[in-house]
Image: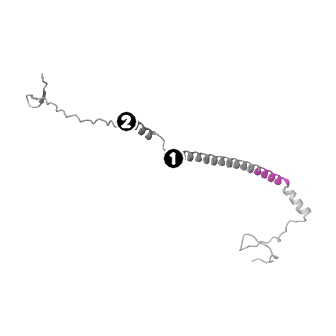
Amino acid sequence: MASRNYYIEEGGAVRKVEAFPKRERVRRPEPVRKKKRASKTYKKAAKEAQKSAGFDLKYTLILAVMVLAVVVSCVVMLSVQSSVESKEKRIESLQEELQDIQADNAAFENKLNSMYSLEDVYTIATGELGMVYSENGQIRYYENEQGDYVKQYSDVPETTN
C-alpha cells in the first residue's frame, strides 16, 4: 500500500483535502573510492612515523639551550635573592646599632643636663671665673643690617642713633 501525503487548506466553510503523490528518492551514485596504493610498505610507514616522532639534532640543541637558560636564570635568581637577604640583615644590624647609639646619646645628654644646675653654674661663674652681673647702662643694643650675627673687631661706639 502506498502512503500518501495530504495537504489541508483551512479557511472558508469547507476544508479541502488534496492528495500529493509521494516523491521517490533519486539515489546518487556513490563516489568511487580509490584503493590505497599497495606500494607503500609497512617499513616505509614505520620510518616516517619514527622520523616525525623522534628527536632530531635541531630539536635536541634547542631543548638543551632552553634547559641551560632556565638553569642559569635560576642560579642568577638565587644569587640575587641571597644578596638581598644579606643586605636586609645588614640593614637590620645597622638599625639596631643606631638605636643603641641613640639610647647612649640620650643617656649622656640626661647625665649632662643633671650634672650642673643653674645655681652651680652661677657659683662657678662668679666665684671661680670672677664674672659679675651687668649693671644698668652697661647693656647696649646694636642693630646689624648686614646679617644674623655680629663679630666684634673693635669697641662698640658710645652713641647709638
Residue 120 locus on image (x, y percent):
87, 57
- Give the residue drawn at x 84%, y 55%: 117
The region drawn magenta spans 101-115
Quadrant of the image for the N terminus? top left
Q: Measured along the vertical axis of the image, is residue 133 above or below residue 49?
A: below
Q: Is residue 112 magenta?
A: yes
Please name which of the two marks, 1 or 2, marks the residue nearer to the observer: 2
Residue labelled with disc 2: 41
Residue placed at 47% from the left, 40% from the top?
54
Left/right of residue 80 with respect to residue 50 in the rendered view:
right
Majority SS type along the magenta span: helix
Q: Nearer the viewer, residue 117 or 158?
A: 117
Q: Position of residue 57 (x, y in %)?
A: 50, 45
Q: Alpha-carbon distance for marks 1 and 2?
A: 33 Å
**SS class, disc 2:** loop
Q: Label 1, on which residue?
A: 62
Q: 45 or 133, which lies in front? A: 45
